[in-house]
Amino acid sequence: MHWSPAPPCKRSHKPYNPIRTRKGARAILTAEFRLLVITDSHYAVNHEPGTTKLSCERGCELIGLAIEDARKYGFEAIALLGDLVNEAAGPGYEGTGPNFERELADIRERITAAAPDAPLLVVPGNHDRYPDAVLAAFGARAGLREIGGYRFVVFADAYAKGDYCTRSRTDLEMLRDTAARGGGPIVALQHGPISPEIDSSDYPYMHTNRDAILSAYSDAGVLLSISGHYHAGQPLNENGGVLYFTAPAIGEPPFPYTIVALRRRNVTIEPYELG
Ligand SMILES: [Zn+2]
């Protein structure tokens, strides 16, 4: 008699978009935690289509479409990494942003319809006008949030005139204290890109105290740091034992979003496009 093993279970996972790599497909299927990352929608209700590379008028719709598309793969939480709306904030920008509240309400409504139960991690960006109001609109807050065995730390960095941005000393201390307490792997979230360095004299968006952030992340044993803002994105890279990734902007063709698959300390970046 020959013994035949039972046929393997059929995969119920049927992706709509082609998964780019076998490794990525396996990582998504076997992940302990999948974080849906959406950034830089730059939503503006009165935007004239075609005046920039950004489709600001579609920003809210694109967020909804990304969530609906990503539900085919599954995710445990959603991270919005800033510049949700196209209403610049800070000194020198006063008087802009008449549709700020309506735009935030539109996005909130769209997310609630697409993923009513998903935990939301919200990072304010330099175009989000009033960071506290953005967090409040989503019932979110900066700081530590533990979900599914991972410790997510949201940094709401302050932007000064000229869009120069600095990580506060309080936030650096908060990270150090969080690391000292022990717990699951730490994932840091902020709007501005950190690594690799963008070397351009006309690009003020890297943190003024970038070196202090790199050291703090390394000392705290941060597993992964995820940023937005730099619309082309930056691939996963390692710096001082910490992994860094910059997600591309959903507001520009080909309207990308990302699923970050985590399994213990393994990190896989899976990029998708809405077209
Ligand atoms: Zn930005």
Image (cartoon, rainbow, N blue to C red):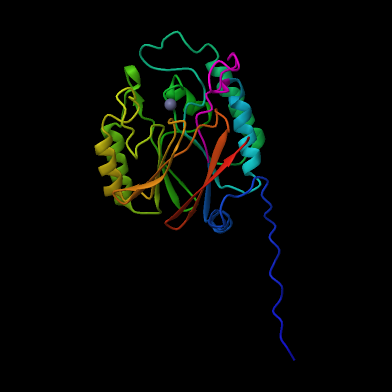
- The location of residue 39, given as percent across then percent down, is 50, 33
Identified at 65% across, 41% down, the residue is 69
Identified at 59% across, 32% down, the residue is 63
Quadrant where the C terminus is found in the figure:
top right
Residue at the far right in the pictured view: 1
Residue nearest the viewer, comparing 239 with 155: 239
- Seen in the picture, residue 262 relative to 273 is either above or below; the reply is below
- Seen in the picture, residue 74 relative to 170 is either above or below; the reply is below
Along the horizontal axis of the image, is 218 left or right of 28?
left
Residue at the far bottom in the pictured view: 1
- The location of residue 46, given as percent across then percent down, is 59, 13
Identified at 73% across, 88% down, the residue is 2
- The location of residue 215, given as percent across then percent down, is 25, 43
* Residue 52 drawn in magenta: yes
Residue nearest the viewer, comparing 10 with 23: 23
User: What is the magenta range?
Assistant: 37-56
- The location of residue 106, given as percent across then percent down, is 61, 23
Specify whether residue 170 is in view.
yes
Give the quarter of the image for residue 206: top left
Along the horizontal axis of the image, is 101 left or right of 127?
right
Give the quarter of the image for residue 257: top right
Residue nearest the viewer, comparing 109 with 67: 67
Quadrant where the N terminus is found in the figure:
bottom right
**Main secondary-structure element of the magenta-colored stretch:** loop
Identified at 34% across, 33% down, the residue is 198
Name the quarter showing ligand 1: top left
- Seen in the picture, residue 209 relative to 1 is either above or below; the reply is above
